[in-house]
């Protein structure tokens, strides 16, 4: 079964290609607003609360939500809801309790990146926090970008029946053009457009499906007949439940998410952004779960799905339910979901090398012209994008191995450090460095060797381990 | 069945309700 066969319809293909190329138009529209490095990296701290809310939601959720969560709901039933509860709640608190103070501090010290903030918070003239942070972001986030490039290109190559290399080049070109033009502003406005497309996919879709199956009662009865565990939210077991909710522990440490809070025009508006973002997150998350449940009712044997892959349920149902216009939009929406995370992360990777490494470490004693820095950011976005694409093609195994640790590694390295730096005055530079290293290493070791034997999700261990490391080293450091 | 209804309908409302609650609880007083 070819899940993309409907794209042969000229109308569906046109809508699909328009959805893919819309971001470039937005890039041109935002070009005039991007006049400084601050504009390019954090929108000049002048972004509207709605844009910040939807951008945080959209760039935080990749294709994992559309394909992964619907696949989980297909496999395990209503218990998949626990996978969305954790991060939605975490991000709600983040907007208010991390976003607001971080935004204030970052303006006070003119911080343009998360590592800028850490350095000024700890008056780290030796740049230790920055250098360790650059290494962690360089490894995990580059792998993240490369893996998503690869996944996006593979899907595009199947959808359009073109060679993987060409698909990779198209995906790269689609992102890099608008990123170079409008930087963060283009990325954020594109996130808004994608959030709207995702809403269409994850709201209209389930409503349509529920009408088709005869309502929620009929859906749950069908699922119950197939397997009573599908309608028991606790059937996944306590360990899996804690692990699912623990996914949310990774959110405060994702540099591409927290940088969004730094971009809002007024920190007080992050309260409204929290309500808007949570509404969107809830609708998208539960929408994805409903699609998986509807998919199980419609395609009862996993063998009937392409490649026997539960993550194909979204595409199969889209092909079954919709005509060319909505189908083209929804398939375009999947690519949009993938790209919405890639561009945000790629911008952080570029800022890490240009702002954090070059300007603040290598050229620390010299005045650097802002126009030059803006130009350099644009060049490095292209260079980093090209490197990520090459890595995605030639080192697939390494990329897919590394990306397994990316969410947890970044989450444990930066989350506890950020929270304690904002709320515990005795946090020291040495403590934060110890926490970053502990978080990253414990994540890798736990996931590689101990997750399977224990059944415990890595962040549930590495996050508290990093917190503990920061507290202990900070206390020892202060006494010493 | 009740668990399914709760997790599919009551929980999302509760999470969104929490965001509205936090909005009001974290209002800053203007001096």
Image: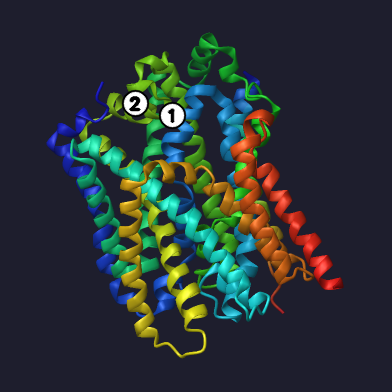
Q: Left or right of A341: which side holds B19?
A: right
Which of the chains bears the disc numbered 1? A
Quadrant where the C terminus of chain A is found in the figure: bottom right
Query: Percent x, y for residue A240?
Result: 64, 30
Q: Nearer the viewer, residue A288 or A323?
A: A288
Judging by the rendered image, the residue that carries numbered circle 2 is A317
Within 10 Å of disc 2 (Cα), the crowding (few <14, some 14-19, many 20+) is many
In the figure, residue A383 lies in which quadrant? bottom left
Q: Which comes before the other along the chain, label 2 or label 1?
A: 1
Q: Left or right of A373: which side holds A53?
A: right
Judging by the rendered image, the residue that carries numbered circle 1 is A291
Judge whether A408 appears above or below A23 on screen: above
What is the number of the mark on residue A131? none
Query: Percent x, y for residue A456?
Result: 67, 34
Quadrant where the N terminus of chain A is found in the figure: top left
Query: Percent x, y for residue A97?
Result: 67, 61
Can the viewer see residue B26? no
Q: Going 38% across and 20% down the picture, which residue do you hit?
A: A308
Judged from this view, the residue extending furthest toward the left is A10
């Amino acid at each position: 079964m070819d899940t993309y066969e409907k794209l042969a319809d000229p109308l569906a293909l046109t809508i699909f290609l328009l959805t893919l190329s819309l971001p470039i138009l937005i890039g041109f529209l935002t070009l005039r607003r991007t006049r400084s490095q601050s504009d390019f990296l954090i929108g000049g701290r002048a972004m509207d609360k709605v844009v910040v809310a939807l951008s945080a939601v959209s760039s935080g959720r990749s294709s994992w939500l559309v394909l992964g969560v619907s696949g989980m709901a297909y496999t395990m039933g209503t218990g998949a809801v626990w996978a969305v509860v954790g991060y939605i709640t975490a991000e709600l608190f983040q907007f208010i309790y991390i976003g607001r103070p971080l935004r204030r501090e970052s303006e006070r010290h003119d911080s343009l990146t998360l590592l800028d903030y850490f350095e000024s918070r700890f008056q780290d003239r030796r740049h230790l926090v920055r250098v360790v942070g650059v290494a962690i972001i360089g490894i995990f986030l580059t792998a993240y970008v490369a893996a998503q490039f690869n996944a996006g290109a593979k899907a595009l190559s199947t959808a359009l029946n073109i060679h993987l290399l060409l698909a990779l080049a198209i995906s790269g070109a689609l992102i890099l053009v608008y990123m170079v033009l409008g930087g963060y502003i283009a990325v954020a406005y594109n996130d808004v457009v994608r959030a709207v497309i995702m809403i269409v996919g994850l709201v209209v879709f389930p409503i349509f499906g529920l009408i088709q199956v005869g309502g929620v009662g009929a859906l749950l009865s069908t699922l119950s007949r197939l397997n009573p565990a599908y309608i028991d939210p606790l059937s996944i077991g306590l360990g899996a439940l804690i692990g699912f909710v623990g996914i949310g522990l990774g959110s405060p440490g994702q540099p591409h998410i927290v940088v969004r809070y730094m971009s809002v025009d007024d920190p007080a508006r992050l309260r409204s952004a929290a309500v808007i973002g949570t509404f969107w997150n809830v609708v998208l998350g539960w929408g994805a779960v409903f699609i998986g449940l509807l998919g199980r009712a419609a395609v009862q044997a996993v063998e009937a799905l392409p490649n026997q892959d539960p993550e194909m349920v979204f595409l199969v149902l889209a092909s079954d339910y919709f005509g060319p216009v909505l189908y083209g939009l929804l398939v375009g929406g999947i690519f949009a979901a993938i790209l919405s995370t890639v561009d945000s992360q790629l911008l952080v990777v570029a800022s890490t090398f240009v702002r954090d490494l070059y300007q603040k470490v290598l050229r620390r004693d010299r005045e650097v012209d802002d126009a030059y820095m803006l130009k350099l950011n644009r060049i490095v976005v292209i260079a980093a994008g090209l490197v990520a694409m090459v890595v995605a093609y030639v080192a697939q195994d390494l990329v897919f191995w590394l990306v397994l640790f990316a969410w947890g590694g970044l989450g444990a390295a930066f989350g506890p450090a950020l929270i304690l730096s904002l709320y515990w005055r005795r946090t020291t530079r040495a403590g934060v460095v110890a926490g970053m290293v502990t978080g990253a290493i414990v994540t890798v070791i736990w996931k590689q060797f101990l997750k399977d034997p224990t059944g415990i999700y890595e962040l549930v261990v590495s996050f508290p381990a990093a917190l503990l490391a920061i507290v202990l080293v900070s206390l020892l450091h202060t006494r010493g | 069945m009740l668990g399914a209804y709760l997790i599919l309908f009551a929980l999302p409302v509760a999470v969104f309700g929490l965001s509205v609650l936090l909005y009001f609880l974290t209002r800053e007083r203007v001096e």
